[in-house]
Amino acid sequence: MQANMTALINRQKMKKPKYLILGIIILITTTGYYVYQKAMILATHTSPNDNYKAIIKRNRGFFIPTMPGDGGANSLPVVVILKDSSGKTIEKSSDNPECSIFDGSIEIA
């Protein structure tokens, strides 16, 4: 009887580290996924009088889906955000579903 109790206690002690390690792995994986999926800022442009700022962002992905003749990374869609001097968003290109902006098509003088 004593041997059965000792074996049961030992099994329970072995399960706790497994769940702890599993929890740590899940935490690291979800945190890494969240950080990786945040939008990547490609460029920031400020107007000459410092009243406006244009921020160009692109969502990250595990793979850049391009094919030969596609134009490479410059043919991927981006989001352009226009902000005023106080940091308030004036307009986002993603608010217009009929407007696709690509990284290679943006020219700011």
Image: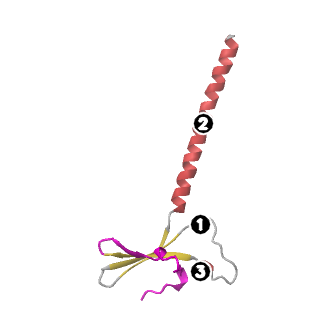
State how far apart marks 3 and 1 are (Cα): 14 Å
- Circle 1 sits in a helix, a strand or a loop, which is it? loop
First in sequence: mark 2 or mark 3? 2
Q: In this view, does 80 lie above or below 17?
A: below
First in sequence: mark 3 or mark 1? 1
Q: Disc 3 marks which residue?
A: 75
Magenta residues span 85-109
Q: Disc 1 marks which residue?
A: 61
The residue lying at 52 percent from left, 57 percent from top is 34
The residue lying at 53 percent from left, 68 percent from top is 59
| Three-letter code, disc 1 | Gly
Q: How many marks?
A: 3
The residue lying at 46 percent from left, 77 percent from top is 93
The residue lying at 50 percent from left, 63 percent from top is 38
In reply to whether residue 88 is colored magenta, the answer given is yes
In which quadrant of the rendered view does residue 37 lie? bottom right
Percent position (x, y) of residue 24?
56, 43
| Three-letter code, disc 2 | Tyr
As drawn, the label of residue 19 is 2
Percent position (x, y) of residue 6?
66, 17
